Amino acid sequence: MTDPIYTGVERMHTKHRMQPEDKIYIAGHNGLVGSAIVRKLQKEGFHNIVVRSHSELDLTDQKAVNDFFEKERPDYVFMAAAKVGGIQANREALDQFMYVNTMIEFNTIMAAFRTGVKKFCFLGSGCIYPRECPQPIKEEYLLTSPLEITNEGYALAKISGLKLCEYLNTHHPEQADFIAVMPCNLYGPGDNYHPEHSHVIPALLRKFNEAKVASKHEVIMWGTGCAMREFLHIDDVADACFFLMQNYSGDRAVEANVPGVSWVNIGCGSDMTMRELAKVIAHIVGFNGEIVYDHIHPDGTPRKLLDSSKLFSLGWRPSITLEEGLKQTYADYLVNKDNYRS
């Protein structure tokens, strides 16, 4: 089953394309992105899907990961497992975000390589790019200046995973086909609504809803509200990952064993200020009070708009509007607001 949007897309740059009978491992299938990828694969007729919960397979355990790959021998891998959190969680545990994510990535990437996985999709993050970066952010801007300190540990881990994929493609072109994707800020049903450890959209949905229920007259937001962000629905990013897995290879920018920019940004092409986002969410939730900004807390990176022209040039575009996606996410929050993860 092929989505009409992909019809006619040139596929000369892919070594492998998933077939319905192929065995596909989704690392992090219970997470926001991983669960969306599972849904996308099932919608497209792929049902030979292998998953393991954290209790069944600890991806920081190298031996356990190696044993799993030796036993299961998946044909394709989507690497969506990660330790994630918002600005507060990141800055309070830079060491853990760097260590845990690096271990997860390196163990999984190398086990996949050693067991001959046909293609591997590594999910990074737009936070890998420098704090002060020309906008929109092109893939080649990576490592051109310092990172945002509040999430530096997570960013360094993701950069390491991206680079390991690139090095494998460069030095083992006949064996490796590792693609790396860098999504912008993601949101959608199934998000983490933890009051301290969530990302901005689920955090604001929770904050505005609680204020409405308590009949509060104001909501306090961290920062100035001037920081700008780009948001993409999880079903769109899952669609993009599927599209790239079928139409793109990690060696496209690697020629004559010279490392190139082989990763791909995934965004929607537009951004908005936190003030604008807050107003939209307040309207959807039905909070009519005042929004007050606490300037003591940091904004994070001033602006983070990805240049997704490489992906768009291949024929992919997002399909879910922000308002539509926020309404879906708010409905999910009302059902699952007490089932947040720590």
Image (cartoon, helix red, strand yellow):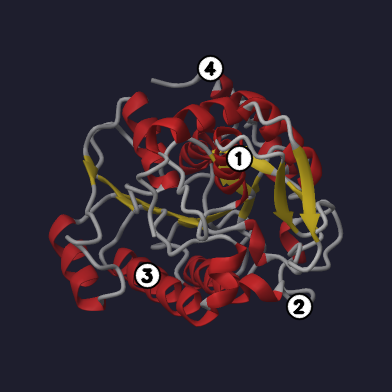
Question: Tag 2: Cα neighbours inside 10 Å, few (<14), some, or many (≥20)?
Answer: few
Q: CA distance from mark 3 to mark 2?
A: 24 Å
State the image quarter where residue 315 is shown.
top right
Q: Residue furthest top?
A: 4
Q: Quadrant of the C terminus?
A: bottom left
- Callouts 1 and 4 close, C-beta under 8 Å: no
Residue 281, compared with residue 65, is above or below; it is above
Question: SS for tag 3?
Answer: helix
Q: Which residue is mark 2?
A: 146
Which residue is depicted at the point 74% across and 67% down?
297
Q: Which residue is mark 4?
A: 4
Q: Quadrant of the N terminus?
A: top left
138 left or right, relative to 96: right
Question: Tag 4: Cα neighbours inside 10 Å, few (<14), some, or many (≥20)?
Answer: few
Q: Earlier in the sequence, mark 3 or mark 1?
A: 3
Question: SS for tag 4?
Answer: helix
- Callouts 3 and 2 close, C-beta under 8 Å: no
Question: SS for tag 1?
Answer: helix
Image location (x, y in percent) of residue 56: 17, 60
